[in-house]
Image: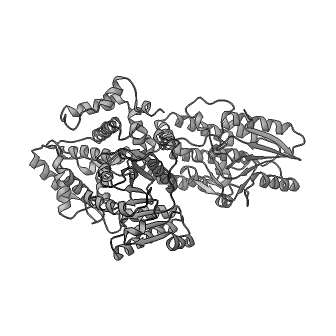
Amino acid sequence: MTDPVRYERDGGIAVVTIENGPVNALSQAVRAGLDAAFERFAADDAARIAVIVGAGRLFIGGADISEFGTPPAAPLLPDVVGRIEASEKPVVAAIHGAALGGGLEVALGAHYRLALDGAQLGLPEVKLGIIPGAGGTQRAPRLIGLKAALAMIPAGGTVTAGAALEMRLVDRVAAGEDARAAGIAYARELLEQGAPARPVGALPRPVADAAALDEARARLARKARGEVAPLAAVDAIEAATRLDLAEGLAEERRIFRDLMETPQRAGLVHAFFIERKVAKLPEIDGIAPRGLDAIGVVGGGLMGAGIATAALLRGLPVTLVERDAAAAEKAAGTIAGNLDAAVKRGKLDQPRRDAILAEKLTVATGYEALSRADLIIEAVFEDMEVKKQVFAALDRVARPGAILATNTSYLDIDAIAASVSRPSDVIGLHFFSPAHVMKLLEVVVADKTAPEVTATAFALARRLGKIAVRAGVCDGFIGNRILSHCRAAADRMVLQGASPFQVDQAMRDFGFAMGPYAVVDLAGLDIGFLTRQRKARDRDPRDVVPTWADALYHMGRLGQKTGRGYYIYEAGSRVGRPDPGVEELIAKARAEAGVSPRDFTDEEIRRRYMAALVNEAARVIEEGIAQRPLDIDVTLLHGYGFPRWRGGPMKWADMTGLGSVLADVRRCAAEDDYFWRPAPLLERLVAENRNFDSLNAG
């Protein structure tokens, strides 16, 4: 096996190269190699200065994720960084690509830092439920100051090389792509200047600022609601203001070890791994995707325009078809507005925005304009007959081999595929609104979808920067099916006596971004009403119909788009206040149903809601709609605001204990054995003393 750390000399310059592809992760072998290299450097009288450089496309990407969950092996990274910093001869870190987590901590152990243009630097550990554990919270504040450290570390963000120079995180930014050459050139300059070793740890403690610390804690309590690591990072940074380096490092390590034992760390690490595993599917392993050089979109409403925007932002030419010139013009305006917003957020510059609209976007009113598209996405009204009409037209004009995709949220894609002459080319691509912002894409594979069509859908997701999840065909696929079941559980609690506003608050306290009734307002009460109408013929008499929601629909209270739904929204605000009129409608529904309301505790609401979610998710897995529990976790994390620090609902269930979840389902079944029938898979896993994660193997 090749040594992952090389020591060589260029005259009086020792060059320490880390080569542990693909990201030069700080494995035990790399740590040992660095430790040995700096022991050698100390003894090498001919070496007057050292340069640390990463081989390949970046400096150091951080910890070795294959070691997550295993006992740490010596040498530990804090000791390695300490050895580098303690060098009596100067050390330069030459950074290209990225220096993240432990990679930046290694650079902070060096005495001088050079970054190439385009490099990214950051300490993202809080995104894994921990804090930097090798001096990042102690050295960075000494170098960049308290306020800059509070802005960067608890958020887990990264900064560009230019920003790093401004904040004094690096000493120099160099052009070009050769970090080794740039690092050696900088080292020669330092030798000529007689530059000494300059340990960051010897710098004065950052000046304490109680107001800045309080502001950071208040901001994180709002933004990172429920998460422990961001606030713990503030505690560690505060320690840097009052402790000398050795004591500060000990306090940082104490906090780090405590966080390693928290469920949040386990949940966030689970989320990290499953996002990398979700696209690995046996059915497309080794299958080459079809070409993707031009995209067509049918329908220029908010969803269609969002899909078009997502493709345009990633360099794909788009032809969008609308029913008439006025609608086409409106769609073009919506897309232009989306791009303007991207410019405002700094995601796009004005010249590129103008070039996209001039060169990449075509709007038309006839299907013939789509004849050269490689993939056409239908995004019209959620009605089966309307969609079949669109697919009939696409079947006539699309070139052989073109993929025909539907963006339906609920409808039977097998039925749509059966209506055309090329069912193997049909697939579902369920984008989430706004499509150019939301990362989730449900790839709904119909019965006759060809494997290369599925592979192309996943390739498109990668091209668009989205996370794709494979789903099977059923009403609502993975996410909306589970969400509908959860909302039905919430409706049952409301009919029995809970307030919809209490339900929302209870689930926000659990960690959801929004409660179920606030989500209804966001989507629009018309969506729920039309869905209930569509399912009316198949409704079981034991179903609970939220007649109060239907009443709101008939009153024109459709949610945020009309300024009133379950909540009242002031002009320009997306945060509503409870509408007291809703309680009156619910009281009427209870009276008509002969229900005597009772009180619910917030804890009971949360347990029932999560029991319903997990129970239905188990059915979704058993039916093959989701192939693995991790597919459900990724779907709920990225499409439905499930708290990331809980890892996803299936990981939450595993950590809670499946026996406990099943007991909640059975308690509820004692009063309603229709809705609360335990899922056979859940019962089987409990009986076999297994968990959902055991189904993620392979």
Horizontal and vertical percent position of residue 357: 49, 72
Horizontal and vertical percent position of residue 71: 59, 29
Furthest-top residue in this view:
688
- Give the image's coloring scheme: one colour
Q: Is residue 641 visible?
A: no
230 vs 472, left or right, is right
Q: Residue at x 78, y 52 (%)?
A: 183
Q: Residue at x 44, y 40 (%)?
A: 647
Q: Can residue 236 be seen in this view?
A: yes
Q: Residue at x 72, y 46 (%)?
A: 55
* Number of callouts: 0
Residue 176 falls in image quadrant: bottom right
Horizontal and vertical percent position of residue 146: 61, 53
State whether residue 654 is above or below residue 292: above
56 vs 353, left or right, is right
Image quadrant for the N terminus?
top right
Please state which of residues 602 and 21 is positioned toward the viewer in this rendering: 21
9 vs 314, left or right, is right
Please state which of residues 644 and 638 is positioned toward the viewer in this rendering: 638
Horizontal and vertical percent position of residue 427: 38, 51
Q: Residue at x 13, y 48 (%)?
A: 590
Please state which of residues 366 and 228 is positioned toward the viewer in this rendering: 366
